[in-house]
Amino acid sequence: EGKNADYIPQLSRINPEQYGISICSIDGQRYNIGDTEIDFTVQSCCKPINYGIALENLGEDYVHKYVGREPSGQAFNELLLNKKGNPHNPLINSGAIMTTSMLFSEEELSSRFEKLIEVWYKLSGGLYKIGFNNPVYLSEKKTADRNYALSYFMNEKNENKKTGFPDNTDINETLELYFQNCSIEVNTKILSIVASTLANGGINPFTGKQIFSSETVKNILSVMLTCGMYDYSGEFAFKIGIPAKSGVSGSIMIVIPNVMGI
Ligand code: GLU
C-alpha cells in the first residue's frame, strides 16, 4: 500500500508495483527476491552515509556543533530548527543539507561528487557500478523550493555566527551536491551490501576493508534508530526495533547489527 512521492514529478511516474528485497549477511551470504535488479535513486538513504563521511573527516564534536541528534517528530522537510537554531538531526532534510555542506568542502563540486560515488563503491564492495539518474536530479532541482527555503532559513542564523552553516559554505553548491547525491542510482542488491557494511561495524564483507570506523557506525546506527523513519521513527522503533532509513523513491535500508543488511 501507499503511494508514490509526487512532489518530484519524475518519482511520481515510477511503477509502484515494483517490489524487491535483498539481504546480505555480514559474512557475505546474499538472498534476493522480486525486482532486485531495477535501479532506483537512493534519495534519503544517502543521508546516513553522508553523516558517516562527515564524522570520519571532521569528527563528532565539529559535526554536532552544526546539527543535533534528536528526532524532530515532524515531516522530513519541515521548516523547523531546534532551540539552538540547528537542524534536529542529520537524517531530516535540513540536517542532511547541513552535513552535505561539510562533505569534502575544500574541493571542486565535481570532485566532491566523485568522492561520494567512491565511498558508495567501497561500501558496496566494488561488486557493481554505482549509477546516477540525471532526469531525477533535474526534476528534483527544479522542484526544490522547500530545500532552498530550509537552507536560507539555516543560513539566516549565520549572521550572528552562533549557528548556521560552517564558514565559507556556498548554499547553491551545497544544494547542487545534495540533489546529485539523492540521485545516485542503485538496486536493492547494492543497497543491501552497503547496509551489511554498516551491520559489520564498517568493514565490507567482501573486501574486508574498513570503510567507516566502528565509532562512526555506532553513531550512524543510533540516529537511524531514532530518526531514520522521520515522523514514523518512534513507531518503527517500537514495532520493528532496528535501525532503518527510508527514501522518497520507496527504498528502505535496514541494518541488523552483527547479522545483516536489508
Ligand atoms: N531528495 C529528497 C528531498 O530532499 C529526499 C527526501 C527523502 O528521500 O525522504 O526532498
Image (cartoon, rainbow, N blue to C red):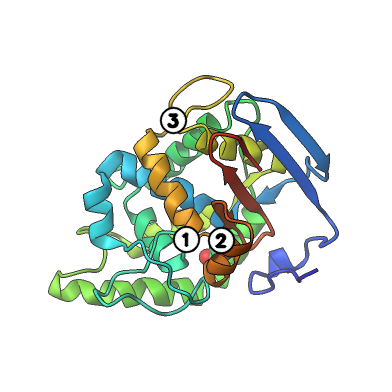
The residue carrying mark 1 has its beta carbon less than 8 Å from ligand 1: no
Q: Which residue is mark 2?
A: 237
What percent of the width, then of the height, locates residue 182? 55, 55
Q: Is residue 43 above or below residue 12?
A: above
Q: Is residue 143 above or below residue 165?
A: below
Q: Earlier in the sequence, mark 1 or mark 2?
A: 1
Q: Secondary structure at mark 2?
A: helix
Residue 226 numbered tag: 1
Alpha carbon separation for disc pair 1 and 2: 7 Å
Residue 13 occupies which quadrant of the picture? bottom right
Residue 211 numbered tag: 3
Q: Earlier in the sequence, mark 3 or mark 2?
A: 3
Q: Secondary structure at mark 3?
A: loop
Alpha carbon separation for disc pair 1 and 3: 23 Å
Q: Is residue 104 visible?
A: no
Within-10-Å neighbours for mark 2: few <14, some 14–19, many 20+: some
Asked if disc 1 and disc 3 are in contact, CB closer than 8 Å, the reply is no
Q: Secondary structure at mark 1?
A: helix
